[in-house]
Amino acid sequence: MVRRQYDESDVRVRPGRGSRPRTKTRPRHDDAEFGMVVTKDRGRWGVVLDGREDAVVCMRARELGRTAIEVGDRVGVVGDTSGTEGTLARIVKLAERTSVLRRTADDTDPYERIVVANADQLLIVSAVADPPPRSGFVERALIAAFVGGIHPILCLTKSDLTDPAPFAEEFAALGITVVIAGVDDPVDEVRDLIAGKVTALIGHSGVGKSTLVNRLVPDANRETGIVSGVGKGRHTSTQSVALRLPGEDGGWIVDTPGIRSFGLAHVDADTVVGVFDDLAEAAEDCPRGCSHAGPPADPECAWDQLDPDSATGRRAAAVRKLLAALRSNNEWEM
C-alpha cells in the first residue's frame, strides 16, 4: 500500500473572523466643531458649540477609548450637530486642559476624580453657621485650587446668622479674595468677580450653594434643600452642570454636587509649597525631608527663621495650616 504524500496545496485555510486588515490610520476630523462640555450623565455629554446657545447631545467616539471627558472640557464634535431631539453627535477630539480641579475619595485612594476642567476660578462656598464652618474643608479646597492652577475665592453664606469676619480672618494671610453672600446681602460683588470667566462652585450640602446659583442664574432652577437635624445637608445637586451667566460679559458657573469628603492623595507637601515662590525659596535652606511642620516635628525648618510679622512669615503660618490639613486624612469629613 502506497502512502499518500501531502503538501501545502492540500491544506484548506478557512478565513477567520475579522480578516479585514486593520489600520492605525484614523480620520483627521478637520471638520470638527468645537465647544464646551456642560453636562455629563451616563455615557452622554451635553456640548454647547461655539456661537450656539443650546447643547448638542454627544457620545464619545470609539477612537477616544476610555479618555475621560469632564464638564468644562473643550471638545471637537462631528456628526449631526443640529441639536434636534433624538440626534446624537460624536466627540472626536479633546483639547489640552488649562487647569484641572481634582480630588480623591480619601487620602488613601489612588484614583483621582476630576471635579471640573478648564475652570478659571474656584468659588469655595461655606456657611458661617447652620452648618458650622469647617476650616479643614476650605483648606483642602484651597490646596486643590492652588495645585490645579485655579484662582480660589472664598464665598461665605448665612451671614444673617453670625458675623463672618472671624472665619474670614483665618485665611487673610493667604491673600485670597473673600466675598459675603448671605440671603440679605447683594450678590453684585460675586457677579463682578465671575463675569466673563469659568467659575466652579464647591461646598458641603446645605451651605446655600444652590440658592446662590439661583440668584446668579435666575432660570437655573437648581433644587435647594434644608440642613437635616444631624448636621448633614441633603445632596440637592447630584450632577455637575455648567450654566451660562446672564449679561453681556457672559461667562459660566459650574455647579458641582455637595461634597462630604475631599481627598488629596495626589498632592504632596512640596507641591503645595511650590505654589508660593517666597516660601519655596525659604524652604531651600530646610534639611532634606523637612515637612515644614515646625518644632518639634521639624526643629530645623528654615521657616522658623522668618519674621512672624512679615507677609512671608504670616503666609508661612497659614501654609503650615494647609499642610496640617493635608496630613489630617479627612478628619473633618461630615
Image (spheres, rainbow, N blue to C red):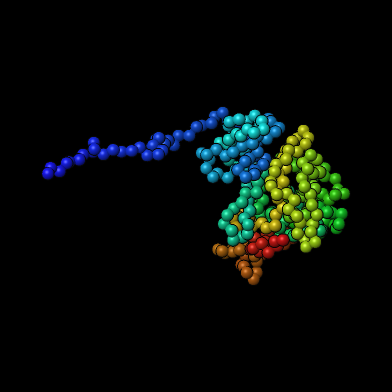
Looking at the image, which residue is at 12% across and 44% down? 1
Closer-to-camera residue (271/96): 96
Residue furthest left as drawn: 1
Q: Quadrant of the C terminus?
A: bottom right
Q: Is residue 130 left or right of residue 263?
A: right
Q: Position of residue 47 (x, y in %)?
A: 65, 37
Residue furthest front as drawn: 1
Q: Position of residue 37 (x, y in %)?
A: 65, 39
Q: Position of residue 309 (x, y in %)?
A: 74, 60
Looking at the image, which residue is at 72% across and 40% down? 243
Q: Position of residue 123 (x, y in %)?
A: 73, 48
Looking at the image, which residue is at 44% across and 37% down? 24
Looking at the image, which residue is at 59% across and 64% down? 290
Please indicate, yes or no, whether residue 88 appears anywhere in the rendered image. Answer: yes
Q: Quadrant of residue 262?
A: bottom right
Q: Quadrant of residue 328?
A: bottom right
Q: Is residue 212 left or right of residue 261?
A: right
Position of 97 relative to 89 (above/below): below
